[in-house]
């Protein structure tokens, strides 16, 4: 499959080793995905300062296998990115990663934070 997929890595923690995984409802997943795709579409249309427009920017879709992969990384209690080879999944030619930690349950906030990097 040559599709894009999105995974959300969310942990609520006071210290990394106290991280706990959150169960996301379908509506939370869709809100996160909707915001991510809204910002991607804005960029594709050339409406993001400092970024070129795109002619073929696919919408992201949710994939629970990627969520489980992200959860495995959270359970290791390591801050930061894992290795790309640790994210390999059948059906995906490449899996990227956005990482954030915090206490907010407004998951779209993290999307905007990544977008503004």
Image (cartoon, rainbow, N blue to C red):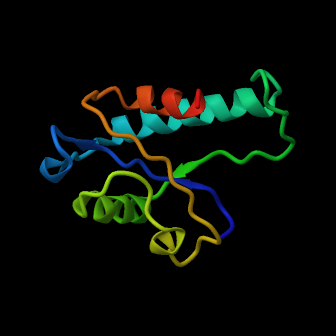
7 left or right, relative to 71 = right
Q: Is residue 21 above or below residue 39?
A: below
The residue positioned 58% from the left and 31% from the top of the image is 117
Residue at screen point 23% across, 61% down:
75
Side of 39 relative to 48 (left or right): left
Front-lying residue, 76 or 42: 76
Pick the front one: 52 or 65: 52
Task: Give the left or right position of residue 84, taking residue 38 as reference.
Answer: left
Place residue 41 in its image quadrant: top right
Q: Position of residue 65 (x, y in %)?
A: 40, 66
* Residue 13 falls in image quadrant: top left
The residue most toward the bottom is 90
Eyeballing the image, is 35 above or below 79? above
Residue lying at 45% horizontally and 73% vertically, measured from the top left: 86
**Which percent across, then down, holds residue 1?**
65, 71
**In this picture, is 103 found above or below 26?**
above
Residue 76's spot in the image, x, y percent? 25, 64
């Amino acid at each position: 499959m040559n599709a894009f997929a999105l995974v959300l890595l969310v942990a609520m923690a006071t210290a990394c080793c106290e991280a706990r995984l959150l169960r996301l409802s379908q509506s939370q997943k869709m809100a996160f995905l909707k915001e991510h795709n809204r910002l991607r579409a804005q960029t594709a249309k050339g409406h993001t300062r400092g970024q070129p427009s795109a002619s073929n920017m696919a919408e992201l879709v949710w994939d629970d296998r990627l969520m489980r992969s992200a959860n495995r990384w959270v359970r290791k209690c390591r801050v930061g990115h894992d290795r790309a080879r640790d994210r390999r999944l059948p059906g995906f030619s490449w899996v990227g990663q956005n990482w954030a930690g915090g206490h907010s349950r407004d998951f779209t906030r993290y999307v905007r934070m990544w977008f503004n990097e």
